[in-house]
Amino acid sequence: MEHLRFVGVVLVVMAAAFEPGANAQLSTHNLVNSLYDFTICQGTYALCAASTCTPTAGTIEVNTATGNASFPAASCTCPVFDGPAIADPNGGNMQGSCKPPGKGQVWSLYAPKSNVPQAVNNWSRKRSDTAVPPQLCSSTDAVGATFANCFSFACTLDPKRVNGVKTATCLCPLGEDLSGDPVQPDTTIIIAAGQCDSSFCAEHPVGAPLTALNGQSSQCLGSASSVELDLPTSGN
């Protein structure tokens, strides 16, 4: 059941990302409040959806349903936005509320956006350089244990902007799902980094596991309206 709940979150958020502006925020807000144990935080946040990360050789503690667990840590640089964003106040390493983790810090949250500045394009703000088409990294790529999950983790605001873009450095776990459980290497991952360059699957991208799609090939999904995924119709 928890697995299906997680898949539902990913697909709902992915679909909402391609809705027009205000409608996306409204529909996502309603779905989050009615279906899931997430909340909407207002204010400054980091959006790591299109980022890649660098392993630190250290570990990070994450919240789980029964306490906490330790995962390999990675450092991720993410653009900063202001406004409403989805959070899991009891997940990541949040402490039960939207209150910032500390002075000069923000949470890495999620909001549906079709354009996000990215390090791969030197934080350019041109529309073509900020597009974030989702792509699947196949279970045969064996990157399930090396992608980063930055959802609801603490970040430190960087002192300088790059090309006018404010960024934050976030410490995120590798190979962890939204429940605080480890992800198997042979798991399909959905990412938005790399603008559909499949080589980014191996660059520790921020993403989410989709075991329901294990066995499917790596592919650019392009937009939610063109996605044709072989989802199971039944199961536990």
Image: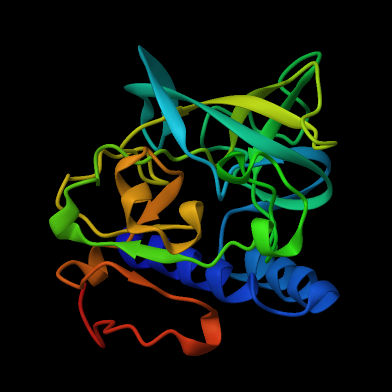
Residue nearer the viewer, 34 or 171: 171
Image location (x, y in percent) of residue 123: 70, 41
Work out whether residue 208 or residue 27 is closer to the camera in this orientation and state it. 208
Q: Residue at x 37, y 48 (%)?
A: 200
**Image quadrant occupied by the C terminus:** bottom left
Is residue 89 something that shows in the picture?
yes
Q: In this rendering, would 222 be left or right of 156?
A: left
Name the quarter where the N terminus is drawn.
bottom left
- Of residue 88 and residue 199, the one placed in the foreground of this image is 199
Q: Is residue 44 left or right of residue 220?
A: right
Q: Nearer the viewer, residue 175 or 3?
A: 175
Colouring scheme applied when the structure was drawn: rainbow
Residue 216 percent coordinates (x, y): 20, 73
| Residue plotted at (74% across, 63% down) | 127
User: Which of the 4 quarters of the picture holds residue 94?
Assistant: top right
State whether residue 70 appears in this view.
no
Picture coordinates of residue 209, whole percent (x, y): 33, 55
Q: Where on the picture, by quarter, is residue 63?
A: top left
Residue displayed at 56% across by 37% down: 90
Please tell me whether residue 50 is drawn above or below residue 75 in the rendered image: below
Q: How many marks?
A: 0
Q: Give the answer, above or below, for where 54 lies relative to 86.
A: above
